[in-house]
Image: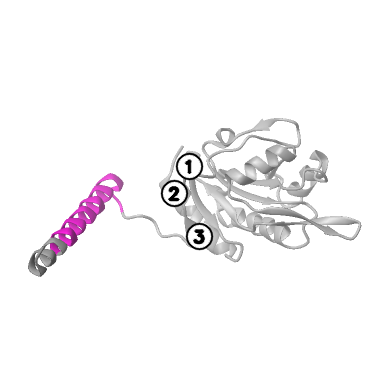
């Protein structure tokens, strides 16, 4: 093959790739009809993980994401003896709900324990309700906890501390829209105001 033919073939491939990219962009724009929203958190709309859960609330009722249809759900994994990360996340969650005003009733905060051995139902309920009466704590046995964390790409690990132990764990929150679709990851360092801005967009653009 001559050098001229090789260059021509490369130009054709580049032109074809550019055309395909342009068509794909137009197709997506045609489907969405609006420009995608801009979030302070990480947009994971369409992700193939963090799809659902099957855990138990402190009153012994099995819960899944479908139970909260019609509300945005903010979900955090932690443990009640956490010294700083978990209390900070739940204080922020309460502030986010307050900032949403009337729309605060359309937000369900869920706290999933990664320490079911110590976070018994009565402990879990008292802990979450200390931050807000509407917050719900969920738990599973060790196997279910591990399966749920894996399905959500959440890291946690038991760390011995003398005669006891603590838990290392991921420090982010997931947000589902009112239709039960995963939408966002909120970073731990985001302010309550930044998170509330994101929740307002989710609630405004999505109805059950």
| Residues at marks 3 and 2, CA–CA distance in whole angstroms | 12 Å
Label located before the other in sequence (1 or 2): 2
Counting every numbered tag in the picture gives 3
Badges 1 and 2: C-beta atoms under 8 Å apart?
yes
The residue indicated by pointer 2 is 45
Q: Nearer the viewer, residue 74 or 107?
A: 74
The residue indicated by pointer 3 is 41
Rendering quarter of residue 125: top right
Badges 3 and 2: C-beta atoms under 8 Å apart?
no
Q: Is residue 124 left or right of residue 8?
A: right
Residue 120 is a magenta residue: no
Secondary structure, mark 2, is loop
Query: Range of the magenta residues?
Result: 11-34
Q: Residue furthest front?
A: 1
Percent across and percent down for residue 115 are 76, 47
Residue shown at the point (16%, 63%) measured from the top left? 10
Q: Nearer the viewer, residue 99 or 44?
A: 44
């Amino acid at each position: 093959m001559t050098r001229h033919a090789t260059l021509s073939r490369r130009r054709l491939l580049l032109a074809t790739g550019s055309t395909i990219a342009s068509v794909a962009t137009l197709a997506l724009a045609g489907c969405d009809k609006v420009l995608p929203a801009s979030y302070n958190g990480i947009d994971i709309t369409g992700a193939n993980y963090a799809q659902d859960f099957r855990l138990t609330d402190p009153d012994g009722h099995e819960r899944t994401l479908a139970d909260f249809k019609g509300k945005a759900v903010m979900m955090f994994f932690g443990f009640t003896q956490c010294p700083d990360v978990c209390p900070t996340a739940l204080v922020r969650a309460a502030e986010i709900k307050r900032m949403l005003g009337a729309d605060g009733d359309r937000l369900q905060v869920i706290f999933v324990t990664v320490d079911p051995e110590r976070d018994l139902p009565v402990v879990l309920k008292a802990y979450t309700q200390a931050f807000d009466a509407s917050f719900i704590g969920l738990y599973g046995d060790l196997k279910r906890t591990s399966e749920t964390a894996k399905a959500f790409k959440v890291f946690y690990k038991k760390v011995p501390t003398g005669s006891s132990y603590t838990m290392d764990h991921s420090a982010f929150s997931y947000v589902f829209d009112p239709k039960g679709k995963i939408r966002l990851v909120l970073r731990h360092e985001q302010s309550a105001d930044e998170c509330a801005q994101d929740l307002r967009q989710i609630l405004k653009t999505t109805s059950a």
